[in-house]
Amino acid sequence: MPRTDLDQLWDQVRGATRAGQGLGSLSPSLAARQLGYDALTLCLATPRGHLELLWSDDAAGRLGPALDDLQYTLGEGPTLDAARTGRTITEPDLTRTPIDRWPQFLPAAARTRARTVLATPLHLGVVPAGALTAYGTTPGAPTAHQHES
C-alpha cells in the first residue's frame, strides 16, 4: 500500500518530536503544499474542551484574516464543527455554502481569499484531541490525491 502525503507529514512530526524540536521546526506552508492546499492549521483541545491554535503558517494570514481566529471569535465554523462533531467537514466553495450553516463565519470568510476548506477531527483513541484544517484559494471538491492523504 503506497504511503500517503499525510503519512509522510506525520512521520515528519514524529521525527521532530523525537529530536526535541516540536512543530516549530516544521513548515506548515510546506505541509499544506504536500497536501495540495494553500494553508494548514492544527488546533488542539484544551482540558476544558476549547481549541487552541498550535500550528499555523504565514499563508493562512495571506489568505486574509486568520480564519481560525475568526472561528474562535465568532463561535462557529468548520474547524469548530469538526472538533465538536468528530466528523470531517468539507466545503468545496465557501461562497456557495448556505448562510444558515455559519451565519457569522461565512460573511467574514468571504472577505478572505479562502474558497475551500477541509477540517479533519483528531482523536487520541476515542478522546477528541482537536482538528487539522486545510484551506485552499481555488474552489472545488478535494481531489483524489487529497482524499488519499
Image (cartoon, rainbow, N blue to C red):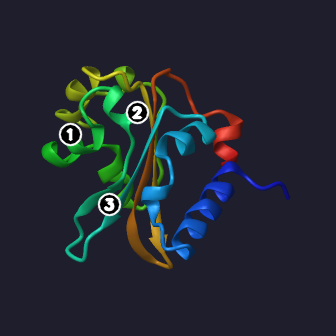
Q: Is residue 122 above or below residue 53?
A: below
- Please identify the residue farthest to the right as the structure is shown: 1
Give the camera-side residue of 137 and 34.
Answer: 34
The spot of residue 62 in percent (x, y) is 34, 27
Q: Which residue is mark 3?
A: 84
Nearer the observer, disc 1 or disc 2? 2
Give the amino acid type for the residue marked by disc 1 in the picture: Leu
Q: Residue at x 44, y 24 (%)?
A: 93
Q: Quadrant of residue 77?
A: top left
Q: CA distance from mark 1 to mark 2?
A: 15 Å
Look at the numbered disc 3 and give the secondary structure of its residue. Answer: helix
Local crowd at mark 3 within 10 Å, few (<14), some, or many (≥20)? some
Q: Which residue is mark 2?
A: 59
Give the camera-side residue of 94 and 131.
Answer: 131
Q: Quadrant of residue 91?
A: top left
The spot of residue 130 in percent (x, y) is 37, 63
Local crowd at mark 2 within 10 Å, few (<14), some, or many (≥20)? some
Q: Which residue is mark 1?
A: 70
The spot of residue 2 in percent (x, y) is 83, 54
Of the image marks 1 and 3, the number of the one nearer the N terminus: 1
Local crowd at mark 1 within 10 Å, few (<14), some, or many (≥20)? some
Q: Quadrant of the N terminus?
A: bottom right
The spot of residue 5 in percent (x, y) is 68, 49
